[in-house]
Amino acid sequence: MDNEFSHRKGLTFEQAEGAAPLPSQLKLKEISDDLKAKMWQVFHMSIDEGGGEFIVDPWDSILRNHHVERLLKPVDTFSKWKPDVFSEVKKDLFSNNYLFFFGFIQHVLRDRRCPEFIKQAVPVVLAKHRAAYRVIDGDTIAPFATQEEGATAQKALDELKAAKMDGARSHLRNAMSSLTAGSWADSIRESIHAVESVARTIAAGTSTLGPALTEIEKQLGMHPALKSGFGSIYGFTSDDSGIRHALLDKGDAKVDEVDAMFMLGACSAFVTYLVQKKRAAGI
């Protein structure tokens, strides 16, 4: 019960209930409401700096170019009056079209007059809200993950559901929710537990992953190199030079978003592999 409460404490109710299992980092072509709101706050603050009823440079030049080059509107219809400017920018930043949202932001970042505040704030906001896109090289927005990575995670959930491995599926969903919530250690721990749960279900009577993989190697004909490879990945989380389970349980391990993303992908792929090998063997 304590572990379950600890897991839920860092999540919204919707995340904890698994309403949207795929992590936001894997949801390409989507923009969360909280990301829209925070990004609008950042741009509004910068554009409104200095007060007054009309915008001044650099925003006058940046948004005038945006009006002509991106919106393809006549230059003489551009308004410097702040309510008009805010209305036009807000349409892009509160659009449900990710092309408008990220297209506008990248256009601003690539303008040589882009305010330093925007250059520094945008990457922070995207990372803080676990967006599926991040700033690369200072002025380019690119996917943080690939469509294939999202498909791998969803495939694992589907395979576990079909195999009726509810415990493992719950662990994997928790790993995804924790990744969206920014709880990196919790996500890694749950990803590992998903693999352990599947392995121990297949190799009944084993208590830890190592012995379970040894038994699975015998039962399913898993290649020794594959077993050794995943054993090494597992060692990252369990031996003295890696991240110990105790630290993961406390959420104190020195891991980051990239570590958690990798472990979710690796464990999702391995879980799918194990379930499909089990099915092929008729076990």
Image: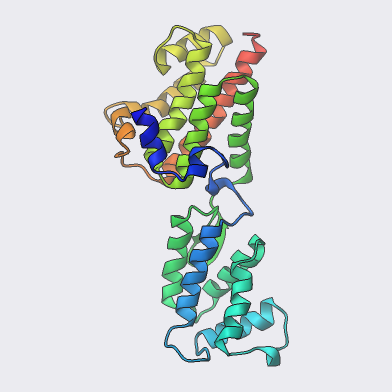
Picture coordinates of residue 82, whole percent (x, y)? 55, 86
Quadrant into which the N terminus falls: top left
Residue 100: x percent and y percent? Answer: 65, 67
Does residue 244 sit above or below 179 in this rendering?
above
Residue 19 seen in the figure: yes
- Residue at the (44%, 6%) spot, across then down: 205
As drawn, 154 above or below 131: above
Q: Please name the residue shown 41% across and 74% down the image.
A: 117
Residue at horizontal 43 percent and vertical 9 percent from the top: 206
Residue 76: percent from the left, percent from the top?
A: 69, 93
Between 77 and 72, the residue placed more toward the observer is 77
Name the residue rendered at 29%, 39% in the picture: 252
Quarter of the image for residue 228 reads: top left
Quadrant placement of the C terminus:
top right
Can residue 261 be spotted in the picture? Answer: no
- How many discs mark residues in the rendered view? 0
Residue 190 placement (x, y as % from top left): 44, 31
- Residue 17, compared with residue 47, is above or below; it is above
Q: Is residue 267 above or below residue 61?
A: above
Which color mode does the image show? rainbow
